[in-house]
Amino acid sequence: MNIQESVIGIDLGGTKILIGEVTKGGEILGAKSYASNTENQTKAVEVLLNALDDYTQNIGFIAEKQVGIGVGLVGRVDYKSGIWLEIEPGKTNPIPLAEILNVKTGLSVSLGNDVVCATMAEKQFGWGRETNDFIYLNVGTGLAAGFVVEGRITQGGHFNAGEIGHTVIDIHSDIACGCGRRGCIERLASGLGIKEEALRHLKDYPKSVLAKNQAELTGKMVLHAAEEKDELSGKIIDNAALQLANLIMNMVRTTDPECVILGGGVTRNEHFFQKILDNLQSNTIRFVTKGVVLSKLEKDKVGLIGAAVIGMKLGNEGGKE
């Protein structure tokens, strides 16, 4: 294999760090997963640097030359200055991560929010090849979106655009969100929200299959139980699908996309995806001409590919210039 150039992609998530080597055509030449520590940013960076050392020394690179590094990060990222601003609200410790990695490796470094990176992967190698106007909605442990308009992603004046998990969809809800409001969709329809909904209502459904293993309960388990006609799970999933459909129909009014792409592990459940589609009103989404669709990219690889994309500096998505 004679590959001239590649980019190093680093996807830092809440539970793992995925490091890999990616070609400019989006092919992953190699990758390794490491446990992450997101207790705070300082600790997260320490673990990231150790993981990069291990990858460099023990895995190595296939291409003759690495032309840059792209890093996808949880939280808020100043991609213009190469600074990781905060890991989550209340845990703010701005770190010049692009400079740190540049000094360590001598390579050009670009940073981006993890959902921004996933959006740019979709733009470069997925549905974005068919349209310059789309919304990428990531429904995983949390919930956020990337808005691409005329080929450019919107990141906002404080690098906080796309945090639509904090859209209130139930004004009468007593469910508090970390953002300070109540009734946010992330508390009801993300993987974590689905799990929390199940735990809140289990006392009223003692015969639910979910009651057997509360300590190990996950959103994925609730989704599977709903497919098996568990009453509690069915109600939770029906409501989550309805609210996600409402969110989609609200979002399409803002940027007039041709396509809405669903990514993240939660929407990969076919039963759940179909329920979302069933709740969409044709008149509301009539201009979404390419449909509400699932991502074309592997959910476990999209973050890594997206990190590599921003490392390629192909658009306005990230990087210290």
Image (spheres, rainbow, N blue to C red):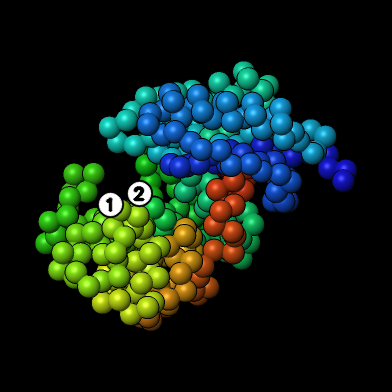
Residue 160, by quadrant, is top left
Q: Position of residue 221 (x, y in %)?
A: 38, 64
Is residue 243 visible in the rendered image? The answer is no
- Residue drawn at the location 54% of the way across and 63% of the way down: 295
The amino acid sitting under disc 2 is Glu
Q: Which mark is residue 166?
A: 1
Q: Position of 319 compared to 240: left or right?
A: right
Badge 2 local density, few (<14 within 10 Å), some, or many (20+)? Answer: some
The local secondary structure at tag 2 comes to loop
The local secondary structure at tag 1 comes to helix
Image: 234 above or below 150: below
- Residue drawn at the location 26% of the way across and 64% of the way down: 211
Which residue is at the front of the view, 31 or 103?
A: 31
Q: Are marks 1 and 2 in contact (CB under 8 Å)?
A: yes
Q: Position of residue 307 (x, y in %)?
A: 58, 42
Farthest residue in the top direction? 103
Badge 1 local density, few (<14 within 10 Å), some, or many (20+)? Answer: many
- Residue drawn at the location 57% of the way across and 33% of the way down: 110
Q: Which mark is residue 224?
A: none
Is residue 256 visible in the rendered image? The answer is yes
The amino acid sitting under disc 1 is His
Image quadrant containing the C terminus: top right
Task: Find disc 2 in the rendering and name its residue.
Answer: 163
Image: 103 above or below 263: above
Farthest residue in the front direction? 212
Residue 168, by quadrant, is bottom left
Image: 106 above or below 236: above
Image: 129 above or below 81: below
Q: Position of residue 88 (x, y in %)?
A: 34, 37
Disc 1 to disc 2, C-alpha distance? 6 Å
